[in-house]
Amino acid sequence: MVQLFPSFVEASFGIPIAELTNSCWTIQKSEWIDETKFYKAIQQHSTTLAEEAILEYLCKKSKGFLPDLILHSCLQTIIDTNGNCEIFKIANDFKMSERTLQRKFQNYVGLTPKQFATIIRFQTSLFEMNAGKKSKLTDIAYNIGYADQSHFIRQFKSFTKEKPFQFREKK
């Protein structure tokens, strides 16, 4: 499986971003049948050859894709801050309105900046919980930028359907 930016899929494969929301897309056999590495990977049951074939195929298809360096910087800012950032400040830093950033981000990534930041913050909480330290959940919540523990619990539960302490106990 390969996960791609929606903007890459639209530019490279002509599939509108709106059709990709919460769905998967399979490369049709007619698209790759002439690619010898795909055929070899299937014949030899080789994941290494399959990875090479997919990468080569995507590189060929990417000729029409021009990455948006400003949005990449926005993405990196959100990742670097572990999702603990103010979207309006990011928009101001790049000289655009918050709404413009939201619209561009949605078209490029498939999520709003706030949704992306929420996912990054959740991933950070998982990393903190799995780091082997027996940190208190309250400390984890505050360290990753939640205003209070109840907000952390609600958001964690929205991703896992469990409260953080229940999730930790299962581990």
Image: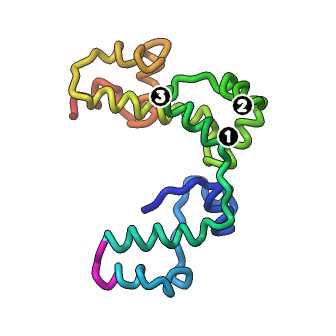
Q: Which residue is mark 3?
A: 82
User: Magenta span has 110?
Assistant: no
Nearer to the camera, 20 or 100: 100
Q: CA distance from mark 1 to mark 3?
A: 19 Å
Q: Please tell me whether residue 39 is drawn above or below residue 115 in the rendered image.
A: below
Residue drawn at point x = 41 percent, y = 80 percent: 37
Quadrant assignment for the N terminus? bottom left
Main secondary structure along the magenta-highlighted residues = helix
On residue 94, the disc is 2
Which one is in front in this view, the residue at disc 2 or the one at disc 3? 2
Vertical placement of residue 2 versus 79, above or below: below
**Which of the marked residues, 2 or 1, is nearer the chain's N terminus?**
1
| Residue drawn at x 33%, y 32% as measured from the top left | 127
Tally of marks: 3
For the C terminus, the image quarter is top left
Expressed as whole percent of the image width and height from the top left, the position of residue 55 reads: 46, 67
Mark 3 lies on a secondary structure that is loop
Asked if the residue at tag 1 contacts the one at tag 2, i.e. Cβ–Cβ closer than 8 Å, the answer is: yes
Q: Which residues are magenta?
A: 42-46
57 vs 141, left or right, is: right
The residue tagged 1 is: 70
**Between 29 and 91, the one nearer to me in the picture:** 91
Label drawn at residue 154 = none
Asked if the residues shown at circle 1 and circle 3 are in contact, with their CB atoms under 8 angstroms apart, the answer is no
Residue type indicated by callout 2: Phe
Q: Which numbered disc, 1 or 3, marks the residue closer to the eye?
A: 1
Say which amino acid is labelled 3: Asn
Left or right: 8 with respect to 147? right
Q: Amino acid at mark 1?
A: Ile
Q: How is the image coloured?
A: rainbow
Earlier in the chain: of badge 1 and badge 3, it is 1
